Image (cartoon, rainbow, N blue to C red):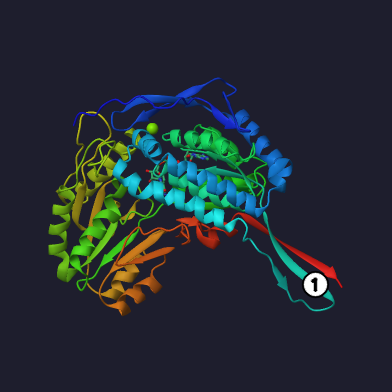
């Protein structure tokens, strides 16, 4: 494949605390790798709990004192619009950083990550001066009203699969509502968060309002989750780590918790669907970002009557996927994030073979170097197989056969997850029936992975707690205060 070893285009290695770039107290740094080569291309500061303390103290004092405290909603909106503009103006550089750091195909981040991130900052910028209270009629001679106040210091812990977008999903609503934030990016993908940190300074966002600490989950992430002076933790990542974060919150100061976790989303294709659209939708719904998506449609349920044709077309579509250097705009399929993810995905492929599913394409690594796994399609998958039950987080499609709609709904819901679902059919009644019966936070009908900053997103069951985006998402960054006056 021949992938050039790009140098890091940008000096990293510091933490952003109080709008100043500082070393970790220990002086330690760690390497971030380029997943396409498996080699180091930048070093970043390794925050320990003392650094998290410093960042939280900066966020606390910005929240309690300083200009942020007096900043009106209109002014918070202006600052967020300015940040959005800076990110937009540096779109090429940022997508390039994520391509190098996350192995994310640049064509995808140009089309999806970057525009959605910018849209998210602008959407919440628009909310900043529209967070309104209510007057509540109560009995007696009283005037009772509600106000929605910021929660305080937010700790945000984000994953590596959508670095720029996950920053936006946390920073934008937190700031719109008047909170301050300490962001811990994933250890695999810290660079774009550091670059956005430079834009925070350039946008004149007051010091201490946004702090960025790079470091490892069990150290810096854990310190944030159990910090006594953090008022809310917003986490996106695996269900297992989400459980630890919630536990740390419970055992420390009962900080507010929102969790966006894993999924095993059913993507349901009825025989009366537009099959071209369904094949393409199932393909993108699974292989987008090499399958490293919480919403990945990793259980493709296909009606008996069109099963064979659907399988044949899906295999042809997967074979046509262009594998290559993430920095090459023709590339559709890049590497997995790291060696550990590669090994986990290969183990799932072995489990699929062992359990007797039919491996129709892929199933192997692509190059000697880097973390590439070929687009893989299994047919004749049954519900109890490991690949039909566990979140794989890789380019592995499992196609499962179904006959009637009743059995289908029961089987689609037989999972501990409930993040998303999709249904492909020309029958509007059937579509609504599935949409109302499936236990998932998002349902797509004849489409997949359609996101908007205005539309709430989050999980039922073990896929999470709370919602992000939209007005519901904003509410998760405020406390409601009830004020009652005798008149
Ligand atoms: P992870 O959930 O452990 O990592 C996500 C974030 O949590 C990172 O910033 C990490 O540093 C932090 N973290 C890790 N341990 C922590 C702790 N004890 N306390 C506080 N923060 C902590 O996910 P990881 O290990 O990168 O990937 C493992 C699996 O998780 C993947 O194979 C995939 O199945 C799933 N995953 C799901 C994501 C989603 O969007 N739903 C995103 C990333 C991973
Ligand atoms: Mg990296």
User: From the viewer's perspective, is 28 left or right of 480?
Assistant: left
User: From the viewer's perspective, is 134 left or right of 48?
Assistant: right
Kindly identify the residue that appears in the image at 19 percent across and 71 percent down. Answer: 271
- Location of the N terminus by quadrant is top left
Question: Could you tell me if residue 393 is visible in this image?
Answer: no
Query: Where does ligand 2 appear, by image quarter?
Result: top left
- The image shows residue 233 at horizontal and vertical percentages of 58, 47
User: Looking at the image, is 423 positioned above or below residue 73?
Assistant: below
Q: Which of 332/85 is in front? A: 85
Q: Residues within 10 Å of mark 1 (few under 14, many from 20)?
A: some
- The image shows residue 274 at horizontal and vertical percentages of 20, 69
The secondary element bearing badge 1 is classed as: strand
Kindly identify the residue that appears in the image at 40 percent across and 41 percent down. Answer: 91
Residue receiving disc 1: 143
Q: Quadrant of residue 227?
A: top right
- Ligand 1 contact, mark 1 (Cβ < 8 Å): no
Q: Quadrant of residue 15?
A: top right
């Amino acid at each position: 494949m021949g992938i050039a070893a790009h140098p890091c285009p940008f000096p990293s290695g510091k933490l952003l605390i109080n709008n100043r770039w500082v070393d970790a107290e220990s002086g330690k740094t760690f390497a971030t790798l380029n997943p396409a080569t498996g080699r180091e291309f930048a070093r970043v500061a390794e925050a320990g709990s003392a650094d998290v303390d410093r960042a939280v103290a900066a966020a606390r004092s910005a929240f309690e004192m300083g200009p942020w405290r007096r900043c009106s909603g209109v002014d918070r909106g202006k600052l967020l619009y300015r940040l959005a503009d800076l990110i937009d103006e540096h779109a090429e550089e940022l997508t390039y950083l994520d391509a190098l750091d996350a192995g994310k195909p640049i064509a995808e981040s140009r089309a999806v990550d970057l525009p959605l991130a910018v849209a998210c900052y602008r959407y919440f910028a628009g909310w900043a001066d529209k967070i309104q209270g209510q007057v509540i009629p109560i009995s007696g001679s009283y005037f009772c009203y509600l106000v929605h106040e910021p929660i305080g210091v937010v700790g945000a812990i984000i994953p590596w699969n959508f670095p720029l977008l996950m920053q936006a999903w946390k920073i934008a609503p937190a700031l719109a509502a008047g909170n301050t934030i300490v962001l811990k990016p994933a250890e695999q993908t810290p660079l774009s968060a550091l670059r956005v940190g430079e834009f925070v300074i350039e946008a004149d966002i007051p010091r201490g309002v946004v702090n960025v600490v790079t470091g490892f989950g069990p150290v810096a992430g854990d310190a944030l989750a159990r910090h006594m002076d953090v008022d809310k933790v917003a986490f996106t990542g695996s269900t297992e780590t989400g459980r630890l974060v919630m536990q740390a919150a419970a055992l420390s100061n009962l900080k507010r918790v929102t969790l966006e976790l894993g999924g095993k989303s059913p993507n349901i294709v009825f025989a009366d669907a537009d099959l071209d659209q369904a094949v393409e939708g199932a393909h993108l719904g699974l292989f987008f970002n090499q399958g490293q998506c919480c919403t990945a449609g990793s259980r493709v349920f296909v009606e008996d009557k069109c099963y064979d044709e659907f399988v044949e077309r899906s295999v042809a579509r997967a074979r046509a996927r262009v594998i290559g250097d993430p920095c090459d705009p023709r590339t559709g399929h890049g590497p997995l994030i790291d060696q550990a993810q590669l090994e986990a995905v290969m183990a799932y492929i072995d489990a699929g073979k062992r359990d007797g599913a039919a491996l129709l394409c892929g199933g192997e690594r692509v190059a000697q170097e880097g973390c590439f796994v070929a687009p893989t399609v299994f047919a004749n998958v049954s519900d109890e197989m490991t690949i039909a039950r566990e979140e794989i987080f890789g380019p592995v499609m499992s196609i499962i056969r179904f006959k009637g709609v009743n059995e289908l709904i029961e089987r689609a819901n037989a999972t501990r997850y409930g993040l998303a679902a999709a249904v492909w059919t020309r029958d509007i009644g059937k579509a609504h029936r599935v949409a109302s019966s499936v236990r998932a936070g998002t349902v797509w009908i004849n489409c997949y992975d359609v996101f908007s900053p205005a539309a709430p997103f989050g999980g039922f069951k073990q896929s999470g707690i709370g919602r992000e985006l939209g007005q519901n998402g904003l509410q998760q960054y405020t406390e409601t205060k009830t004020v009652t006056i005798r008149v």
